[in-house]
Image (cartoon, grey):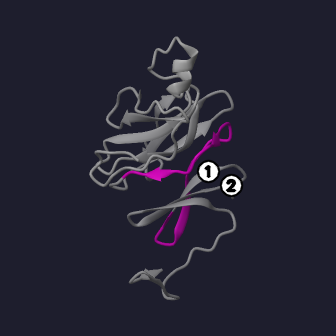
Amino acid sequence: RLEGGKGTPNGPALITTNAVSPRLGPGFLVFLSSRTGGQGIWTLTAGTSREIWHDARIRITGAPTISPDGSRIAFTVSDGAHARLLAMDKDGAHLQVLTESLALQGNPAWSPDGRWLAFVSSREGQLDAKDPQDAKKRGLGKGQIWLLPTAGGEAHQLTFMQHGASAPVWSPDSQRLV
């Protein structure tokens, strides 16, 4: 527990041997765990942990990320042939495939206003580069940042960097990515 930026021994502590990638939401913690025999997404609320998503046929490939209002959780999965970006309510309800058939890398990032998800993918994008040198300069085949509107619609490629891009971070006003 933190008080004034300093750790204190007062208050509850979460001690677990089988949890990774914790993310803090408003009033809850979300994390990955394989305590039921397969990888799943769990929440901890008011001292009670509960598995909210599990599918034995696919593997979670990135840490879950929580929407700014705390109502939704986005995460990436793979069945070995296809990668998908999924989202669901914080209780595990209303699972939705946001986009699929991607070469996803890393974790998605919600914009602070909740309108966009940024993610990194190495799939071939919108650039029509016929010249191999031009394609190399534009980073084709390298991880690039893509944007997906959370209200629905298609993802579009944002960066075309020669050496690729990774780990997008939003500005507080949702106007820029670094």
Q: Residue furthest bottom?
A: 9
Q: CA distance from mark 1 to mark 2?
A: 6 Å
- The amino acid pointed to by label 1 is Gly
Q: Residue furthest right?
A: 37
Query: Left or right: 145 with respect to 173?
Result: right
Q: Which region is colored magenta?
A: 44-67
Image coords of residue 88 (percent x, y): 45, 44
The answer to whether marks 1 and 2 mark residues whose Cβ atoms lie closer than 8 Å is: yes
Image coords of residue 17 (percent x, y): 69, 68
Q: Residue at x 32, y 45 (%)?
A: 176
Instruction: Judge the density around disc 2: few (<14), some (14-19), many (≥20) Cα neighbours within 10 Å.
Output: some
Query: Left or right: 120 with respect to 158?
Result: right
Image coords of residue 36 (percent x, y): 69, 55
Q: Residue at x 42, y 41 (%)?
A: 118
Q: Quadrant of residue 93?
A: top left
Q: Image height check: is 84 above or below 166?
A: above
| Element at label 1 | strand
Q: Residue at x 68, y 41 (%)?
A: 56
Q: Magenta stretch containing residue 49, yes or no?
A: yes
Viewer-nearest residue: 74 or 116 = 116
Q: Image height check: is 171 above or below 98?
A: below
Q: Residue furthest top?
A: 130
| Element at label 2 | loop
Q: Magenta stretch containing residue 24, yes or no?
A: no
- Judging by the rendered image, the residue that carries numbered circle 1 is 40
Viewer-nearest residue: 168 or 86 = 168
Q: Residue at x 56, y 24 (%)?
A: 136
Query: Left or right: 1 with respect to 141?
Result: left
Q: Image height check: is 146 above or below 127?
A: below
Q: Quadrant of residue 98?
A: top left
Q: Which label was assigned to residue 34?
A: 2
- The amino acid pointed to by label 2 is Ser
